[in-house]
């Protein structure tokens, strides 16, 4: 049983590491950003709602995101564990995740914060913009996403630290080295 949330600034490599960790741990990676992007690409109602926010680097409203995560975590493949990437992203979402897990009668095993220097992540995101062409990877939107992270998401690490769940891992380095660090840091929990 492995229930983990992955925290860290935009560009810290959460998506890449979430996929690799989920593979290693045998649980699904659930990325709210990916679910929003799939819905935007598919032209769904959820996608249309989300796009107005994601394109500006704002958080999608909690009621939309919370309902989406609750329904994803109720799927059969998440019963044995999951790795959440991009959720929770503010204090209210931490409470909602607590409520979702309580309904399922389970608890979180760890909150892993992948750390990275701001200038490094801006550089990575600007580079990714040229490769992937993500709509929210322009410099002003990147700066805004980092500000939202600092104001709303970074404080939740302290909440998980108080619960003894926080693990910090340096996100700078080769992809495979960072995965190793994560697996080593998680060994006691996973
Ligand atoms: P990044 O971490 O690189 O900023 P993500 O792919 O995790 O990117 O998220 C992209 C966008 O999707 C966010 O900027 C935000 O608009 C929206 N989003 C993702 N997760 C959440 C969440 N938990 N709550 C609200 N909005 C979210």
Image: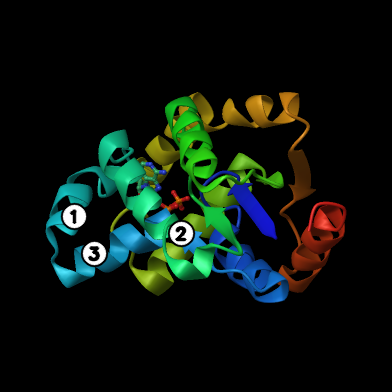
Q: Secondary structure at mark 1?
A: helix
Q: Is residue 187 visible?
A: yes
Residue 121 versus residue 83: which sits nearer the camera?
83
Q: Secondary structure at mark 2?
A: strand
Q: Residue beneath label 2, please?
A: 31
Left or right: residue 51 versus residue 164 is: left
The x and y percentages for residue 66 are: 35, 42
Left or right: residue 23 versus residue 84 is: right
Q: CA distance from mark 3 to mark 1?
A: 6 Å
* Residues marked 3 and 1 touching at CB (< 8 Å): yes
Q: Residue beneath label 1, please?
A: 46
Q: Residue beneath label 3, please?
A: 39
Local crowd size for mark 3, using a 10 Å CA cut-off: few (<14), some (14–19), many (≥20): some
Q: CA distance from mark 1 to mark 2?
A: 15 Å
Q: Residue at x 24, y 43 (%)?
A: 53
The x and y percentages for residue 31 are: 46, 59
Q: Is mark 2 within 8 Å of ligand 1?
A: yes
Q: Residue at x 18, y 71 (%)?
A: 42
Q: How is the structure coloured here?
A: rainbow
Question: Tag on residue 68?
Answer: none
Left or right: residue 48 versus residue 35 is: left
Q: Is mark 1 within 8 Å of ligand 1?
A: no
Q: Secondary structure at mark 3?
A: helix
Sooner in the amino-acid sequence: mark 3 or mark 1? 3
Local crowd size for mark 1, using a 10 Å CA cut-off: few (<14), some (14–19), many (≥20): some
């Amino acid at each position: 049983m492995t229930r983990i949330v992955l925290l860290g600034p935009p560009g810290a490599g959460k998506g890449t590491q979430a996929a690799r960790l989920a593979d290693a741990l045998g649980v699904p990676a659930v990325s709210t950003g990916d679910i929003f992007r799939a819905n935007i690409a598919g032209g769904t109602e959820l996608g249309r709602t989300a796009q107005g926010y994601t394109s500006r680097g704002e958080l999608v409203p909690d009621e939309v995101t919370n309902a989406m995560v609750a329904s994803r975590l109720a799927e059969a493949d998440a019963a044995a564990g999951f790795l959440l990437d991009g959720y929770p992203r503010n204090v209210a979402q931490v409470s909602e995740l607590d409520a979702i897990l309580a309904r399922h009668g389970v608890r979180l095993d760890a909150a892993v914060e992948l750390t990275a220097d701001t200038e490094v992540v801006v550089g990575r995101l600007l580079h990714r913009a040229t490769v992937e062409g993500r709509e929210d990877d322009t410099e002003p939107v990147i700066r805004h996403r980092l500000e939202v992270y600092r104001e709303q998401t970074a404080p939740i690490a302290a909440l998980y630290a108080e619960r003894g769940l926080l693990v910090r891992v340096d996100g700078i380095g080769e992809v495979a080295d960072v995965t190793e660090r994560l697996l080593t840091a998680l060994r006691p929990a996973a």
